[in-house]
Image (spheres, rainbow, N blue to C red):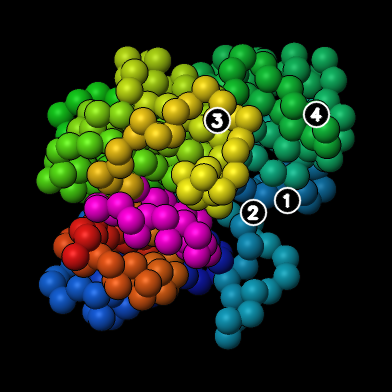
Amino acid sequence: MNCKHFGSCGSCGLYMLSYKEQLKQKEERVSKLLAPFYGEKLEVFDSPSDHYRARSEFRIWHEGNRCDYAMGKMPVDGVREKGAINIDECPKVIEPIEKRMWKLLDKINASTEVLKRRLFAVEFLATTTDECLITMLYHRKLDDVWSAEAKLLEAELNCKIMGRSRKQKVILSDEFVTEKLEIDGKTFTYVQYESGFTQPNPTVNVKMIEWAIKQAKKVGHGDFLESYCGLGNFTLPLSHYFDKVLATEISKGSIHAALENCELNAVDNITFARLASEEMTEALNGVREFTRLKDIDLKAYDFSTVLVDPPRAGLDEGTIELISNIENIIYISCNPETLARDLETLGKTHKVMEAAMYDQFPHTEHVESGVFLQKK
């Protein structure tokens, strides 16, 4: 990927390396961290080097009567500078965003003050099937005049538009997009809501799920437990390889989306529970009862496999203790440092059988990784 803003925009920090060099650097970093637990070569999953990001947010910079997209500045000696730079290209976003974002900006600048006044950011959520949801964020209350102009924009840009301001959400048509992904020979449909978490790189997301499916096929029996399940990104495809599935997630919105996605994909062996990871541990260990679980018979499950996909902080001690008793563990990590830390404990009961690296964020230091562990 080439971008005229490399070196000044803080979004892409590895612009001086070729994509091949970036991958090698990330592979070496993850391999070194996992070396005490895994001696084989990592399986490396690359990304398209441009047009890979399906979710993106841009500030709006006002200069006179004009609006421009803006991004934070590139850090200098590790210190991020204040302020922002205006941009007029962003080749990392997928094409359904790219073809609309500049037309949107032109329309905003050509409009009356209704669309541009106190607009401070624009968020894009798009799919590989060309759906796009645009959220316009304001420092003012939105009224019917704004809705009327934004509705015209929806038709002109063939997209969905929402408006947000303090304690206000204006939905003109829908607050979601519907993604369809080909995963391991099957088509899966995912409703993705504007406020919910979604994997940002659809191409690498499919590779991650298929890698997890490969591990699930090796097990091929028993029940499946998942923590941090989100909207069912991993849950739905992996459910085909187990008898019963219990999936937990703290976000009420994500649970709502996950239930919708089960219906869309005609999957009926998953039970979703709104629990934090720590609460899941307490419930399964019988430490605490939850009203949210009153209709779920936890004793009916015989978990052969667990999948965890925690935030950057990694797993808490209770969750590590819980999953240490399960035969097979699929651990997807967005932070290889905390993954290596957690493996210090998990490695006492389990052996790492497979390890992989996924490059969700080309041109940045960020890297995802995954390990498959089996009980010793």
| Amino acid type for the residue under numbered disc 2 | Ala
| Amino acid type for the residue under numbered disc 4 | Gln
| Amino acid type for the residue under numbered disc 1 | Trp
Residue under the point 24% across and 53% down: 327
Pointer 4 or 3: first along the chain: 4
Pointer 3 or 1: first along the chain: 1
The residue that disc 4 covers is 168
Find residue 183 and report its image quarter: top left
In the rendering, which numbered label is found on residue 293?
Answer: 3
Determine the secondary structure under disc 2: strand
Dots 4, 2 in contact, CB < 8 A:
no
Quadrant for the N terminus, please.
Answer: bottom left
Give percent across and percent down for residue 290: 61, 35
Cα distance in 3D space between marks 4 and 3: 32 Å
Cα distance in 3D space between marks 4 and 2: 24 Å
Per the rendered image, the range of residues in magenta is: 307-329
Pointer 2 or 1: first along the chain: 1
